[in-house]
Image (cartoon, helix red, strand yellow):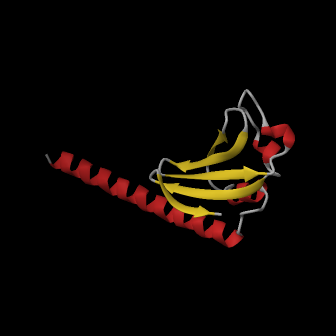
Amino acid sequence: MRKIILLLLTSITCSLSYSQDSIELRNQIQKSFAEEQLIGKELNELVEQLSSYDTEVAWADEPPGKLNGLFFFINDQLYIEVELVDIPKKSQLNMERTWEIDEVKSSKVHSIKIFYNNKLFEELK
């Protein structure tokens, strides 16, 4: 019985610690984006801001094949949605829906949405 209680307490402590780390990370990213005023700047500058994090990138295309943004997944609680404008013509359409970040780094950031626990935390326009 004591082992089960100890295991539960350990799990709860780890979960709370992970959640606190995510909150601190969210606040750090929010502050960094606000200070840098990334709206209207090239995507390259935002990518540099996120370079110290282990992110996964997913593309946003609507209608399918027409690129309009991307997502940066920081962890399972925190992700960032970036809407782009001035996407280079050669990168706008891709029916295979496969883009390379280097092809679109010169695109301009139109808006940034920071999501925490699948809820919109902050929107920068």
75 displayed left or right of 102: left
**Identity of the residue furthest to the left in this view:** 1
* Residue 37 against residue 87 in the figure, above or below: below
Looking at this view, is 35 or 54 the one in front?
Answer: 35
**Identity of the residue furthest to the front in this view:** 63
41 displayed left or right of 64: right
Residue 55 shows in this picture: no
Q: Position of residue 3 (x, y in %)?
A: 20, 46
Residue depicted at x 54% and y 63%: 122
Looking at this view, is 104 or 13 the one in front?
Answer: 104
Residue 17 shows in this picture: yes
Looking at this view, is 3 or 27 the one in front?
Answer: 27
Residue depicted at x 30% and y 54%: 12
Residue depicted at x 46% and y 50%: 118
User: Image quarter for residue 63?
Assistant: top right
102 displayed left or right of 83: right
Q: Position of residue 44 (x, y in %)?
A: 78, 55
User: Image quarter for residue 91?
Assistant: top right
Q: Position of residue 84 (x, y in %)?
A: 72, 51
Q: Position of residue 59 (x, y in %)?
A: 66, 40
Q: Report the number of numbered marks.
A: 0
